[in-house]
Image (tube, helix red, strand yellow):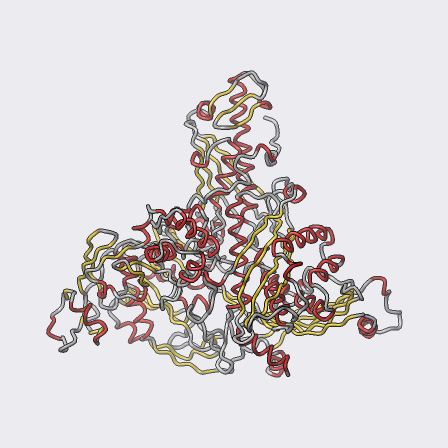
Amino acid sequence: MSQPTKGFSRRAFLRGSGVAAAASSVTSTQSASAAIVPVPIIAGETQVSLTVNGQKKTVTVEPRTTLLDTLRYQLNLTGAKPVSSDGSSGASTVLVDGKPVMASTTLTVAVSGKSISTCEGLKDGDIPKAFVSNDAQQCGFCTPGFVVAVKAFLNQHPDATEEQIRAGLNGNICRCGTYANVLQAVIALVKGNQNG
Amino acid sequence: MAEVDYRWPENHKMRWIGKRVDRLDGLEKSGGTAKYTYDVNLPNQLIVRGLGCPHAHCNVLAVDISEAEKVPGVVYIHRLNAPGPNDDPVEIRADGTLLVAVAAENEAAAAEGVSKVKVQYKLLDAFTADHDLQSAEANGRTKPAGGGIELDEALGEPGDDEDEEEWENKVMQHLFDTSAHVVEGEYGIDSITHCCLEPHGATVHWVDGKLKVYLSTQNVSQADDGFAGALEITADDVDVTCDYIGGGFGSKFQPNYWGIAAAEISKVTGRPVKFMLTRDQELKIAGNRPSGYIKVKLGADANGVVRVWDSLHWGTSGFNGSTVAVGNIPYVFRPKSFRRKATGIVTDNEPSVAWRAPNHPQACAITQTAYDDLAAKMGVDSLDIFLRNLENIDTPEKAPVYAEQLRIAADLINWRKHWHPHGKGKKSGAVVEGLGIGIHKWAGTANSSNCLLKIHADGGVESYCGTQDLGTGTRTVCAMVLAETFGLTLDEVKVNIGSSTYPFSGASGGSTTVGAVTESHRRAAQDALAKVLDLVAKKLDVSADILDAVGGKIVARDYSGKEMTWKQACSLIGIQPLEVNSSYARGTASPLSSENVAGCQMAHVAVDTETGQVKIKRMVAVQDMGLIINRKTAESQIYGAMIMSIAAALFEQRINDPKTGVFVNSELADYRLPRLGDIGNLVVHLHEPESERARGVIGLGEPPAISGCTAISNAVCNALGVRVPTIPLTPKRVLDALRTAKG
């Protein structure tokens, strides 16, 4: 849907200190009078500004809207995939200020003002190319999440050994069984000292 | 024009076929721009979520949707397996069955709507103990699932006055009494789910009375029939598109009732609809593989050649109550005398659907474990027992192929160096290592396929075929065949697949796709090339018989130097493109494709006897597949199949609560699958002696997914000297088996 629907969900969804920091940096379209001091309540639709793949974006979301839904339904960035609601598949991995997070378990309001990198933002880099040349994909549904995870991993471990690669990329599930090829792709990237 | 002689080029002339080629749609996949069904967003679309039944067996008495309708953003609520206000209760036989579907403006509103639906249930007795034959019998949950006996002809026939069954029993008893070695064992393999990472589902909309469907499907060409039949329209009013599919494995052949519901909701609301299953629903209702448990007794001669087999196996395929097909038992090995019987168990689970190599992995795992236990009992090398028993297999002509493959695999895993008698390996702390084998077979027959090929006057080449890419690399193999035939590069040909508006091509199931599409594409390309060569022959004033398409040119082989570029040749076609429709019908004898392959896998594992954890050190797959089209993607298929075998051998299982029957591990955090760190070192050997290669293309998806599980189980047994009877070999099961052995 390109346009969010208005006129519903006026209730508070987020309470508690865990979201206080995020809440303080967003601009609510609703009256703030319902806020419970000292923890603000976010209610209704809210405008959030973020930087996605280097471009500034403003989106209108509900407090409960996940970053994954925002990317997929509002920004037409469908590389991050909805595979598990608990983040255990790694298929929705994106980078938030350079750190890997699961977009499926991250609220959009919690990343207000932050810089998001999705797989699409990495598509011209070396990682997707290494995935292709090592055939590290079959059906490809898990692949974008894996590509982002590899980016994050190589940022931390540009000279990773094979042992480190085997130990460090266990957050992503592939059902087709491309792990052997992903391993080869990452080894090739390290050898080329290219991390996308 | 002479009749076209369909065949592959001679080996030394192949420029594309058999080479390692990057998949053509690779960057779309790894760059995140490939659009799967779940990724298709249509303007003004509704998002649908289903409410799954939380009980394994119940009656749904009433459904109250009034609160759900009040949820902001909820637009429409559709009944699936739920009674209307004055209807009789609806019986539900599987946890997760969709009761109602809530259509809303976005995912969150749909989910909230689902949470507000109130349902009255009457719980019924649930039974899911598929491993427990006695309990199933006591609960009236069994169904006969076939069986029979075959005895060595040398044993004669019953006399005219003898009861046949009594005579058979007597003969079987005699065979066991006179066997040098007798093994009795129980083995099993639990049910697993398909767990496609892109859940089943569809995005649909109606345009001028026609249904346009984006469907995550393995069956582009026939899914329109499924929609048409259910919606009482004709298939010409349904167009199905699937550019990319996020995992299939045998479960995505039909629109399914939720796909039909998407079309119905779209019709009622007048809006496009996206209806994808949740993860929990995907695991519970979108596909599972039957379980199999066996009680077996085998008798062997002094050399360890099995001469008699007697088995009863059981398991479940869900509430329709079948089990692993009895015809596959014993698997590959076929002693001269055998009796087998199968019992299906009716459980309150969703019915099974085809899973990669239906029946074979289970049959292998409950057969060849017993053969390995024979080796253990005799204190003989398992490899020798497998080799010796090749004298009695169900495809005797394959015995030399298996023998060669076992030899190659043994070298690659260094069998003779690492093997030790079962349970006699050196312990390193609490860790012991072991080796195991499995062998398998598969048909891999090419499916029917049609190809529309267009050659334009400017040299452009494009094909249209209603096939799909499950991850096999379908687009790439089609392009390789076209480029090979026309002497072009891959970027000079364009392959169009993934639409039911294209010529029919069979479903991708049973390792039938690469055979199918290479048949139709090679035939179309050869047909079209013959026409082009006729035009060129006239122009160059030579016989078409001496013309070759090579290196972007049409060249005369007579050393006359006569040639023209591909583009010049195509300019002779005229204004209208040259169009060719070529077909292959499944089962037609052809030099391009064939069937029936052999393969073997070996595993080297390390088992921690204190934690019960099994680690894969190395696995080797040796696989015959006839003529290889794309070496790179062929290898990937095998790597993937080996990893799936690791998954089934060590990690994944459907766990039902014994009291309620509820599938308790239906989220990915709990439904364990291997991760990158779990795979050890995998070695793939493409077994392609000229005798196999000359047979043409044979499907590859299924065969390497069969015997890996068995190889791992046998390796664990070799390490421990104790059989862990049921797969997956979880740490608890390993420790339980060790405890039982200690007594």
Indicate the quadrant where residue B215 lies.
bottom left
Q: Residue at x 48, y 55 (%)?
A: A180
Vertical arrangement, residue B620 with respect to residue B177, above or below: above
Q: Residue at x 51, y 24 (%)?
A: B554
Q: Quadrant of the N terminus of chain B?
A: top right
Say which of A129 and B339 sits in front: A129
Q: Position of residue B216 (x, y in %)?
A: 43, 56
B132 up-or-down from B262: above or below = below
Camera-nearest residue between B192 and B458: B192
Image spot of residue B669 (x, y percent): 41, 70
The quarter of the displayed image where residue B315 is located: bottom right
Q: Can see residue A87?
A: yes
Residue B272, given in percent of the width and then of the height, sits at 32, 57
Q: Quadrant of the C terminus of chain B?
A: bottom right
Whether residue B259 is visible to the viewer of this picture, yes or no, is: no
* Left or right, B646 with reference to A143: right
Residue situated in front as seen by the camera: B236 or B538:
B538
Q: Is residue B667 left or right of residue B684?
A: left
Q: Residue at x 55, y 75 (%)?
A: B347
